[in-house]
Structures are given as structure tokens and as C-alpha cells.
Image (cartoon, rainbow, N blue to C red):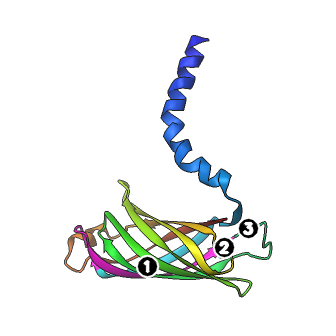
């Protein structure tokens, strides 16, 4: 019995920060739409190097297999993102605007920030958190996660830098 109690305490201590960071948002907000499948291609100017520098970016992509309890006709979207900020191949933060064009003909404009986080396995995770400022889901909070395989990491060490990345994308919209 003591062994189970000790294990429960260790498990709670280890998982507590994860639960605090993730659960309140999901529990407190009504889920408007999820799109678990998508892809994007992004370009950076100037290219991302190992040293943080001012950059601008554009990205184009698609979302599929979307599910929305409040808008069951939504199935997917195309999107375009633009932004500026300071970034490198390993870290960064940029302000951006993304326009989602839903399969229904409606659109959503999201303004927010994008954080860059490099992972040790050679991928970069970009997390966009923003607010729908106009269109469908106005006022909702958007979280878009992009996992980009850095197939040309050597480009980060060149003067030109890494100029193009692509990879899968997921989207969650919550009120």
C-alpha cells in the first residue's frame, strides 16, 4: 500500500506541471474546430542562420479532416501566413497574421505570435497562438502547431541560411 502511495506522489509530482500547462485551456474553452491533418511550405527572408536576426516569412498550406461541432460542414481550409520578427534556426519569436479560407467559402483572420523551438532530433516546432480578429470564429483562440523537418540543417551554417521549410500542421480553435 505504501508503495502505491509513493508511486502516486511521484507520478503527480512528475505530471503536475504538464497537467497545469495543458488541461485548464482545454477544459475551460469550448472547442470550435480541430484539424489534425495538414501541411505547409514556408519561406524566410533572409534565411535562418544560427544567429538570431530580423526576418520576414510567408507560408502557404492546407488543412484537412477538420471537425467542428458548431459548423459540421467544415472539412478543411487553405491558409496563408505572413509575419516578421527575430529568429534563427534554433529559436525565435515573430508576430504574424494568418488567413484561413474554409471549404465553405468563409474565412478567419488570425493575429498572433509564433514561437520557434528546435528539437534535438533535427526538427523545428513552430507554435502559433493567436486570436481570430475577423470572420468565422471571431474572438476565438487559435493554436496551430507546425512540425517542420529540417532536411537541410547544414544551410543554417551558411551565409544564405535556411530559406525554405515544410512539414505537417495541426490546428485547434477554441472559444
Q: Is residue 55 inside the magenta stretch?
A: yes
- Closest to the observer: 76 or 149? 76
Where residue 95 appears, as percent x and y from the top left, is 42, 75
Q: Residues within 10 Å of mark 3 (few under 14, many from 20)?
A: some
Q: Which range of residues does the magenta coloring cover?
A: 47-65
Q: Residue furthest top?
A: 1
Quadrant location of the N terminus?
top right
The reply, left or right, for residue 66 in relation to residue 19 is right
Residue located at (60% from left, 54% from top): 25
Where residue 165 appears, as percent x and y from the top left, is 41, 74
Image mark for residue 42? 1
Q: Residue furthest bottom?
A: 105
- Closest to the observer: 158 or 45? 45
The reply, left or right, for residue 172 in relation to residue 128 is right
Residue located at (70% from left, 70% from top): 66
For marks 2 and 1, give the CA distance.
Answer: 18 Å
- Closest to the observer: 30 or 80? 30
Quadrant location of the C terminus?
bottom right
Image mark for residue 64? 2
Residue located at (56% from left, 14% from top): 3
The reply, left or right, for residue 58 in relation to residue 140 is left
Q: Are marks 2 and 3 in contact (CB under 8 Å)?
A: no
Amino acid at each position: 500500500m505504501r508503495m502505491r502511495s509513493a508511486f502516486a506522489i511521484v507520478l503527480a509530482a512528475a505530471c503536475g506541471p504538464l497537467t497545469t500547462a495543458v488541461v485548464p485551456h482545454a477544459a475551460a474553452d469550448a472547442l470550435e474546430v480541430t484539424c489534425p491533418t495538414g501541411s505547409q511550405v514556408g519561406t524566410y527572408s533572409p534565411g535562418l542562420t544560427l544567429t538570431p536576426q530580423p526576418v520576414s516569412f510567408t507560408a502557404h498550406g492546407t488543412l484537412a479532416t477538420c471537425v467542428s461541432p458548431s459548423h459540421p460542414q467544415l472539412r478543411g481550409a487553405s491558409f496563408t501566413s505572413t509575419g516578421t520578427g527575430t529568429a534563427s534556426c534554433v529559436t525565435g519569436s515573430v508576430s504574424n497574421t494568418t488567413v484561413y479560407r474554409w471549404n465553405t467559402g468563409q474565412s478567419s483572420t488570425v493575429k498572433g505570435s509564433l514561437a520557434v523551438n528546435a528539437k534535438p532530433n533535427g526538427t523545428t516546432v513552430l507554435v502559433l497562438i493567436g486570436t481570430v480578429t475577423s470572420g468565422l470564429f471571431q474572438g476565438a483562440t487559435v493554436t496551430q502547431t507546425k512540425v517542420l523537418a529540417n532536411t537541410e540543417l547544414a544551410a543554417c551554417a551558411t551565409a544564405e541560411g535556411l530559406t525554405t521549410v515544410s512539414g505537417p500542421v495541426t490546428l485547434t480553435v477554441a472559444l
